[in-house]
Image (cartoon, coloured by chain):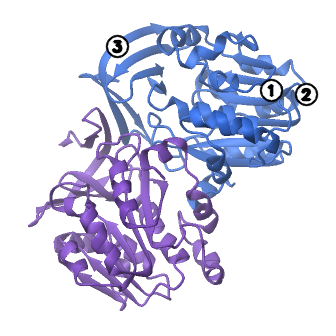
Chain colours: A blue, B purple
Amino acid sequence: MIDQNWFTEKYFHQDVATSFRVKEVLHTERSEYQKIEVLETHGVGRLLLLDGKTMVSEKDEFVYHEVMGHIPTMVHPNPKNVLIIGGGDGGIVREFVKHPNLERIDLVEIDERVIEVSKQYFPDCTSGLSDKRVNVRPQDGVEYIKSFKNFFDIIIIDSTDPEDFAAGLFTKEFYTFVSEALTENGIMMAQTENPFYDEWGIKKFYDNLREVYPVVASFTGPMLIYPGVFWTFAFASKGVKPTSIVESRMPFMEKLQANLKWYNMDWHKGAFNLSNIHKKVTGC
Amino acid sequence: MIDQNWFTEKYFHQDVATSFRVKEVLHTERSEYQKIEVLETHGVGRLLLLDGKTMVSEKDEFVYHEVMGHIPTMVHPNPKNVLIIGGGDGGIVREFVKHPNLERIDLVEIDERVIEVSKQYFPDCTSGLSDKRVNVRPQDGVEYIKSFKNFFDIIIIDSTDPEDFAAGLFTKEFYTFVSEALTENGIMMAQTENPFYDEWGIKKFYDNLREVYPVVASFTGPMLIYPGVFWTFAFASKGVKPTSIVESRMPFMEKLQANLKWYNMDWHKGAFNLSNIHKKVTGC
């Protein structure tokens, strides 16, 4: 809904809305999968919309991308191969390529146009895609993951909301495929919506995860452009604990985190201590 | 701005807005100090506005009130006398009265009408005001605090934004009065806005605090109805550390926190581990 120079997203049964004042519509197209728009806003810089929903803004993208890129990489004992499903904006790849111990980074985005539009309008986000360890695959994530067994150390599900073509990424069956594609110490992460405006049934996501993974945890980070801002993320693993930062990697991160905008190891250590509402809604 | 059954609050140079769908305007008046309105909304229940700005909603008020009420009470070695400046909705008092070790709870709200309107429309928030330890004083907080030296163990500044008649609550001079009114182990807390949309200059608040208090810390909690949701709060003291929960009080809180909606001691212990943007903007 773009109206009178404002972009408005309604949520929580259409009873709450957030709006951003628009300077210019930079791009609009309908790809094979969805409507892709890029707005230049006054308040949050460039804003990527998919089917009219906020996906990425210049102002806050670092939160999502840094937590997804650094939390698993700092706790996995020896991560080498990582996979991102969705995430065509490239932001998580940008964070993963900062870790020299990673050997292979697969980005599987169903909609190639999202990648191309991001390259044009969000060059900072896509800056990691040219790293020689990165393989960009424009294909369906569910199909892709089925062809791997015991291969990836970290898998990030960076998808749109659980509806339409992304719905398959939120089923227990899919989580089982992910689990099979993961190595023994494998870690999976995904975004899990806002517990105050629980439109999708967050508890069910976490219950599904708990049926597949022995370790399931949750944390929060603010996403200014997402409904209600207070965003939750899931960490699931076959045994690795979410706060067991690998000691030998601490000196490396001490240097790196000086140049990050959100992540640091102190924050990481406290991030899994949840408020009551967060515990209640996720069961963590 | 109430328009076509939506209440909209604009912020960050008027470039971002949050809107709540209105079912009914329950109350509207102009007191000696400000316009007071109560809306019945679809998304966040009843919503109190002062001069058109969101103050309290039924959906999220517990976050603000529980962190203000329980953090200082759990770390102060022996709190007896507490003072809230502002906070006419009574929510923080409701949390303080849950602590049997407190002997005196002063609520100094400049606008008596805020208290009366809250009693009528937010009876859950004001439910603590009838506790016999509570003294409600409808007067100016700055004047009130000047008459106390070395008396209060905890002082909470629960005010509107730093403008108009509330501006005096954000000066270094005022923080000095607060410090003088506090006992040796005294703790002061205040809300300190959103670091992403830093309209008021958050760093300056914290710099002022640091000139007066040896211990200055910050934490965050989501306030759905406030601009950008990601809200920060300041903890300042003459020596008490923000996470040094008093061991003898833990069994009491173990029981109490089972019935709280936000606060628990695990969350408290992790809450002061800040993200980089939060550190940078507050200097904590």
The quadrant of the image that shows the C terminus of chain A is bottom right
Spatial CA distance of label 3 from label 1 is 40 Å
Q: Residue at x 48, y 55 (%)?
A: B221
Q: Is residue A133 above or below residue A188?
A: above
Callout 3 touching callout 1 (CB < 8 Å)? no
Q: Amino acid at mark 1?
A: Asn
Q: Secondary structure at mark 3?
A: strand
Which sits in the foreground, A232 or A77?
A77
Callout 3 touching callout 2 (CB < 8 Å)? no
Q: Residue at x 47, y 84 (%)?
A: B79
The percent coordinates of residue A73 (x first, y second) are 75, 34
Spatial CA distance of label 3 from label 2 is 44 Å
Chain identity of mark 3: A
The quadrant of the image that shows the N terminus of chain A is top left
Rendered image quadrant of residue B228:
top left
Chain identity of mark 1: A
The percent coordinates of residue A160 (x first, y second) are 58, 27
Q: Amino acid at mark 3?
A: Val
Q: Is residue B95 above or below residue A184?
A: below
Q: Is residue B87 visible?
A: no
Q: Amino acid at mark 2?
A: Asn
Pointer 3 residue? A25
Chain identity of mark 2: A
Which sits in the foreground, B268 or A275?
B268
Spatial CA distance of label 1 from label 2 is 19 Å
Between discs 3 and 2, the one toward the N terminus: 3
Between discs 3 and 1, the one toward the N terminus: 3
Pointer 2 residue? A150
